[in-house]
Amino acid sequence: MPGAALGRGVAVAYLSIVALIPLAAVVFKSLENGTDGFWTAVSNPQAVAALKLTLIVSVIVVLINALFGTLIAWVLVRDEFPGKSIVNSLIDLPFALPTIVAGLTLLAFYGPDSPVGVNVAFTRTAVAMALLFVTLPFVVRAVQPVLLELDREMEEAAESLGASRATVFRRIILPNLAPAIIAGGGLAFARAVGEFGSLVLITGNLPFKTEAASFFIFSQVESDNPVGASAVSVVLLVVALVVLLIFGWMSKRALRHEE
Amino acid sequence: MRSRYALRFLALGYLALLLGIPVALVFVNAFQDGIGPAWDAVSTPEAQHAFYLTLVMVAVTVPLNTIFGVLAALAIVRQRFRGRALLNAAIDLPFAVSPVVVGLALLLVYGSRDGWIGDWLAEHGIRIIFSTPGMILATMFVSLPFVVRETIPVLREIGTDQEQAAATLGAGPLQTFFRVTLPAIRWGVAYGIVLTTARALGEFGAVSVVSGKLSGQTETATLYVENRFQRFDETGAYAASVVLALLALVTLLAMNVIKPKEARA
């Protein structure tokens, strides 16, 4: 069908012009001074510090998300309380709210003018909080549908055979939820390592302290070092893609294990 | 039963401390000097221009990404060709790319000094970086996957029976698409459009890198918030944020209206 081929061609051309060719330019730029130039740029102490901060905080954020995301999904599915549907729809707010507003929001409550006297501005805690804010929906939204579909009879059977609630959770519920928790966690991680907007106002971007990898890239662009900026970008991109691949694979494995 | 209340308390407490109270506080801070100053802050020429520019981003990005999204979803679900899995994977790439890297990538193609075609563009007097076209490209990049991702499952779900029936009855491919396929997938597409719009309204990092941040010229609403805050005009920053937050709430509402219908389809 010529029409179908045309549509496909337009889609591929659009994707290439908007996304693929520019990304290829980043990869080429990072290798402009050879692999030596790449390593020099990536092993710059400030770059290393920024990448380390981003990776460590992202791992912590994913773990907290796995815990609280699952808890929130659980409460939204298994619990009943007034206003539940409103709470449920507000979960997506971090996806809808512009990231710069998310940062301002956190600064209003946890900044120097905090009404409760908690000031985390310009600390690593602020980096973690901003990332927690923007990644909140991933695990909740991944776990919720699985929990809805989960067969309650399995749990009741286990309980009638004398299993404690903790055992039921550990042996029956958790294995069923694991693929969704892992999948949501992978998306949250990919989002966290690249996050920029929500960090602008609240972290101060102090090199070696609160400067995330995305900010290091930004500062290198501003100070006219495109090769250094590109090299760190490539590292960030590879980390995000590898984590997505691994988490996707783990999620599928957990799914098969369950069957 | 006590554990049930403990879990509820923990979950709602977490949401309130991370999300609910801080967002509510933005509204309080915007109106701390009354409605007048807040209104004045978002009706200055710079603020108006910033919101206008944000609308331009949405008006150009959303239709283009919607057409691309439907075409790509059709190709991935309905066609068999080499590289189909690759195309499917490549579409998700923007989700794994930092917004700053998006901006950098555009600089390296279109920038006047570092760009692959920068010299050629300069010779022909075409300005992309530090001007609206570059900002539109950045917005297109970051919001690229949404329509595709929301359309693919719906397209799989509806199958090809009705399309084949229409073809048997003599409908051409275009007629089949507009009369049969599109009505069946419209809620999936609509959901993708809502997500694309939200992202286009709120993009900051990618646009920030390629905009040059000229107040009143290349400053979108989100850049305006940063600018005001850094100039110690907190009322201005909070007031513009309230407008953006209200748009986000409208988006949420639209998501809630559309989502159940999509599930029913």
Image: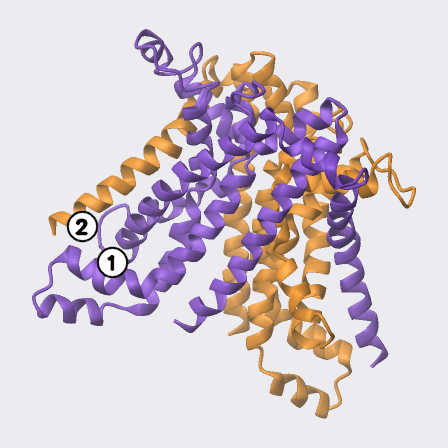
Residue that carries the numbered disc 1 in the rendered image: B78
Amino acid marked by disc 1:
Arg
The image quadrant that residue A250 belongs to is: bottom right
Which chain contains the residue that carries disc 1?
A: B
Q: Which residue is mark 2?
A: A4
- Return the x and y of residue B73 as percentages of the image width and height: 32, 53
The answer to which quarter of the image holds residue B168 is bottom left
Element type at mark 2: helix
Around disc 1, counting alpha carbons within 10 Å, would you say few (fewer than 14), some (14 to 19), or many (20 or more)? Answer: some
The amino acid beneath tag 2 is Ala
Image side of residue A127 versus residue B133, left or right = right
Q: Secondary structure at mark 1?
A: helix
Q: Quick check: B194 above or below A42?
A: below
Q: State which chain disc 2 sits on.
A: A
Q: CA distance from mark 2 to mark 1?
A: 9 Å
Q: Nearer the viewer, residue A165 or B193?
A: B193
Toward which corner of the image does residue A39 lie, by quadrant? Answer: top right
What residue sits 55% from the left and 64% below the top? A254
Q: Residue at x 69, y 47 (%)?
A: A133
Q: Position of residue B35 (x, y in %)?
A: 74, 41
| Chain (purple) | B
> In the picture provided, is B74 more to the left or to the right than A80?
left
Furthest residue toward front: B36
Q: Are marks 2 and 1 in contact (CB under 8 Å)?
A: yes
